[in-house]
Image: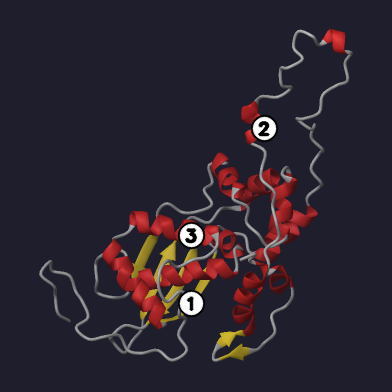
Amino acid sequence: MPVDPQGRWFDSTGPIRVDGGIAVRAKRGKIGEQWWSRKFVDILERSCDPGRLARGRTYARKGQVIDFELTPGRVAGRVQGSRPEPYRVTIAIPAYDEAQWTRILVALGAQALYRAALLAGEIPHELVELFDELELPLFPSELDMTCSCPDWGKPCKHVSAVLYVLAEAFDDDPFLVLAWRGRGREELLAALRGLPEPVETIDPLAVDEVELDARLADFYTPAISLSRLRERPGRLTAPPELLLRVLDAPPLRVRHIPLVDILRPAYRDLADPQ
């Protein structure tokens, strides 16, 4: 295999075409539609070599990723390059253990809005802060990446291709983000449903009824600071494709693409006021 002026290996021929490979839907521009997918891609693009990522995006758009599997703490995939034998890629992060997930679930159980969003198939923005407060980051800042190709640089284009395919998979199933940290969808939802309802908290806007003459000195003083009022979480809404996430996917494909993946953009377009 030839070497470039910097002494790095590179393919002198194009990759072998793959029939039925996993190609990202975004053929141009940014990859990832949902905020959690974009956050993952933003982390990659801040910490990885732009040139290598660009070559990986090309591979991901061509469908050179043959397959990938996500398990707690590990993503393993195969990518077809210019050699007959596909390259094997592994991307690892720390998966949280039982004790750490117990802490996470206790924190989630105290937040009715967060739990409701997860049960509706949505990851609220505030979940990142909740994990950070527990010193258990939801998104990885570092990745342990390996590939069977001879390129010593990280990430190589094969790893980059799997990373972009993974980012778009997060679009389709946000629970993969949590599964990578050690809790799959069904196990997490079962645990959330089994948690006791959070104790009702005091409404920060409520004030006791007091005679006016007793409040003349502090009548215009707010009962709660404005900074705390700004901390109240925003209104959470169910995703437009919630029905597709809840129901079992039909075993139908159109040109190798699952029917659910074809219907999902249509549901989002219907919900778009524009």
Residue 64 appears in the figure: no
- State the residue in front, 102 or 109: 109
Q: Secondary structure at mark 1?
A: loop
Residue denoted by label 3: 38
| Quarter occupied by residue 162 | bottom left
Q: Earlier in the sequence, mark 2 or mark 1?
A: 1
Identified at 33% across, 66% down, the residue is: 53
Question: Which callout, 3 or 1, points at the residue further toward the start of the chain?
Answer: 1
The amino acid type found where label 1 is placed reads Arg
- In the image, what residue type sits under mark 3? Arg
Q: CA distance from mark 3 to mark 1?
A: 14 Å
Label 1 belongs to which residue? 25
Where residue 273 appears, as percent x and y from the top left, is 65, 64
Relative placement, left or right, of 98 versus 4 is right
Q: Residue at x 74, y 12 (%)?
A: 218
Tell me if mark 2 has few (under 14), some (14-19) or many (20+) residues whose alpha carbon lies within 10 angstroms of its own: few
The answer for how far apart the CA atoms under marks 2 and 1 are is: 40 Å
Q: Which residue is mark 2?
A: 229
Would residue 144 be visible to someone looking at this image?
A: yes
